[in-house]
Image (tube, rainbow, N blue to C red):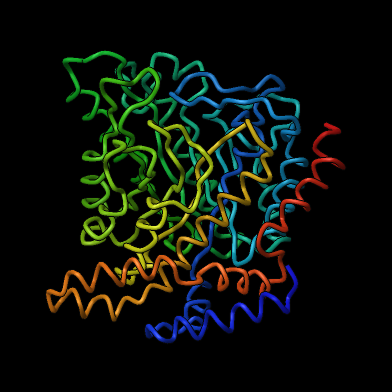
Amino acid sequence: MKNAQILAAYELAKQQYAEYGVDTDLALEKMKEVTISLHCWQTDDVAGCERPDSALDGGGIQVTGNYPGKARNISEMMADLEVVMNLLPGQQRLNLHAIYGDFGEEFTDRDQIETKHFQTWIDWAKKLGIGLDFNATCFSHPKSNDGFTLSSKDESVRRFWIEHVKRCRRIAADMGRQLGTPAVHNIWIPDGSKDAPIDRFAHRKLLKASLDEIFAEAFPAEYLKDAVESKLFGIGSESMVVGSHDFYLCYAAQNKKLICLDNGHFHPTEQVGDKISSVLQFVDELLLHMTRGVRWDSDHVLTFNDESKLIAQEIVRSNALNRVKIGLDFFDASLNRIGAYVIGARAAQQAFLYALLEPREMILKYEEAGKNFERLALLETANALPWSAVYNYYCMKNNVVAGSDYIGEIQEYETKTLLLR
């Protein structure tokens, strides 16, 4: 798109929004608070860097598709991620899983990892001026094959995973210290049962004890923020997941941790957006994993749909942008992986910009006056307001291509780089 066209469309959009009491320039200024944490595992289909033959193995996670060009090492991951960030307006971070260390030729088991294994990533992030986030990797390992990690009744297994997560928190704190921005360390475990167990209580008691021990080591808040993430079910844990939403919500509220809301981890009829204003009454901050579930937790590429819009709207309506960390979590090997990132990250940005452009004050007056027809009519009108013209202007201001122009750039990178792998 040509800049003159983008600017002309924006000026018209600005006038239209002004009629509804919305300042588009102010909305764009608020977009500076929207930082998207890109998940590294879309680059390589969650293979990781532990072994040459690394691949998903257990934990209820499955990647489908075999599109050519996936990253095979850290250098290729970094190159791909830089292409992604160059096609995105605004601010980004990178979210790493513990299996993505720079381990060299020698195998390092997960209870032995250290900051030195991630210094390559830290130095790269420092060069780009971005922050890092981190996750313990409690799946795809022989000690997770029976379906239990931090809640395992096998004490040797439980001790292994406790040590792993302790080390991950130390690494994350080092990332935050070196980069000058706190790293969010998120804990998700696959623990659960395929069929109905009779001793849920014992597993949840063990998980609580493990978390209590893990979090006993304190770090400055300017280095590290801790989050815990629930799931409804997974492959192999259809009947019971130890770390349920109820468990982690109570734990986060009681222990002042971030609760991670992954909108693929709930029943398809649940609205994650509706949970936000409730959760924010009891926790200081929350972490989002934005994704798109198709009939189940399928981790499809995020799109600008009703669910992503409601999540963003509820955060903006709650005046809580500064209390929410925004991350992506999907992995799709059926399409160009760079394209998946750009589509998903732009969808998240568009959802938040759409929410910031909502004529909230006018709609709220109708709501409080009991004028339900007028409220619904204005909500419908807002759907058709030219938010995309404002987003294109946002791209132009950030010196990145607008509209669908990124398609050609990604196709060129695919031809020159991805298809040669």
Q: Nearer the viewer, residue 251 or 388?
A: 388
Position of residue 410 in the picture relative to residue 144 (left or right): right
Quarter of the picture holding the N terminus:
bottom right
The residue drawn where x is 46% and y is 60% is: 351
Residue 53 or 321: which is nearer the viewer? 321
Q: Residue 252: x and y, percent? A: 27, 49
Image x and y of residue 409, in percent: 78, 53
Q: Image quarter for residue 264?
A: top left
Instruction: Say above or below: 262 vs 395.
Output: above
Q: Is residue 280 left or right of residue 71?
A: left
Q: Is residue 212 left or right of residue 140?
A: left
Q: How many marks?
A: 0
Residue in the image at 69% along x and 52% along y: 84
Residue 198's spot in the image, x, y percent? 16, 15
Residue 13's place in the image compared with 304, above or below, is below
Which of the 4 image quarters holds residue 166?
top left
User: Which residue is at a point 35% across and 47% down the rendered structure image?
Assistant: 261
Nearest the viewer among 143 and 163 is: 143
> The C terminus appears in which quarter of the rendering?
top right
The percent position of residue 141, horizontal first and vertical second, equals 52, 20
Q: Is residue 388 above or below residue 93?
A: below
